Image (tube, grey):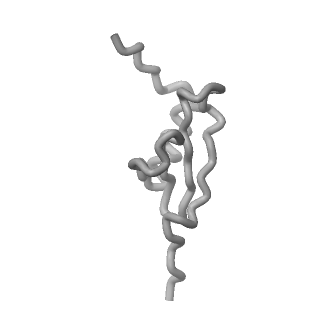
Amino acid sequence: MPSPQPSESAWVWFKSSYSGGNTTECVECAHTPTGTHVRDSKRPEGPALALRANAWQDFVDSIAAGRLTPLPPAP
């Protein structure tokens, strides 16, 4: 019988090392048995993006390889 997955309240959130040094660019992540969740640290009660483990790894690998291009600033 598989063990139950931890509830959302048991997730350990941490600030991304790529978050800005000020309070305007804060991203938090929580790794779970099935993937990674990402949220805005200024709105912890708000929505979180849920990514499967392979999608998160593809994203991280793409950043490391320089395959992602930043968006231009909004007008």
Measured as percent of width and height from the top left, residue 52 is found at 44, 55
Task: Please name the residue shown 62% across and 42% down the image.
Answer: 15
Task: Please name the residue shown 53% across and 42% down the image.
Answer: 41
Q: Residue 32's image quarter?
A: bottom right
Measured as percent of width and height from the top left, residue 44 is found at 49, 48
Count of numbered labels shown in the rendering: 0
Which residue is at the far bottom? 1
Residue 10 higher or lower than 53, as above or below: below
Which residue is at the far top? 75
Task: Please name the residue shown 57% across and 66% down the image.
Answer: 10
Measured as percent of width and height from the top left, residue 49 is found at 41, 48
**With 56 as the anchor, is 14 left or right in this view?**
right
**With 15 as the anchor, is 70 left or right in this view?**
left
Task: Please name the residue shown 63% across and 48% down the image.
Answer: 14
Q: Nearer the viewer, residue 72 or 59?
A: 72
Residue 13 higher or lower than 66, as above or below: below
Quadrant for the C terminus, please: top left
Which residue is at the far left? 75
Measured as percent of width and height from the top left, residue 33 is found at 54, 65
Q: Nearer the viewer, residue 65 or 2?
A: 2
